[in-house]
Image (cartoon, grey):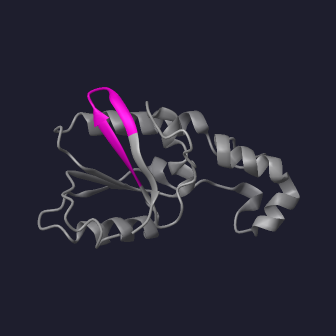
Amino acid sequence: MATHFRDTRFTAAFCSPLQRTRQTARAILDQQASAPALLILPFLTEIDYGPDENQTEEAVIARIGADAIAAWDTHAAPPPGWHVDPDALRSAWTSLLTRAASLTPEANVLVVTSNGIARFLPDVVGQKPADLDRKLKTGAWGTVEISGTETCILDWNVRP
């Protein structure tokens, strides 16, 4: 990713407190001569999967069922026992988009988070591809364009 974004100049940069997101963000920002400060936003931290934390997919499906996983993947509906507040995450994403919109029109903002948190971003964006797979895969990125109060997902699940 760092190589891919080598020529992109970021005006602002945010990530979760997780070590892997900080490392990814720093690797990307280290490619810039005058990178912005990396700001930690607690809401970008990974989802707490409760009793399913660190379990295999088979064990999770055995506990909650395939329909619950499908609802999580397609609608970001948390299964029973998971500790996640979808409304709070949507509100936080809305605030971050508002913050990004207040920057210069040419601003590029880097946000590094987990797929569990990223899957709530499409809910607060005005336009998105009809076939969008809300799960942002490991090592992939999305691009959101902000024009005034209009937001649009241009790319999603892109890998180098």
Residue 91 inside the magenta-drawn segment: no
Q: Nearer the viewer, residue 110 or 5?
A: 5
Q: Residue furthest top?
A: 149
User: How far across and how far down the image is residue 107, in percent?
Assistant: 20, 45
Query: Can I make out residue 14 in this image?
Result: yes
Q: Which quarter of the image is occupied by the N terminus?
A: bottom left
The image quadrant that residue 15 belongs to is: bottom left
Query: Can I make out residue 81 in this image?
Result: no
Q: Which quarter of the image is occupied by the C terminus?
A: bottom left
Q: Nearer the viewer, residue 31 or 153?
A: 153
In the rendered picture of this protein, how many numbered marks are placed on residues? 0
User: How far across and how far down the image is residue 16, in percent?
Assistant: 43, 57
Q: Residue furthest right?
A: 62
In magenta, the rendered stretch is: 142-152
User: How far across and how far down the image is residue 150, in percent?
Assistant: 34, 28
The residue drawn where x is 31% and y is 26% is 149
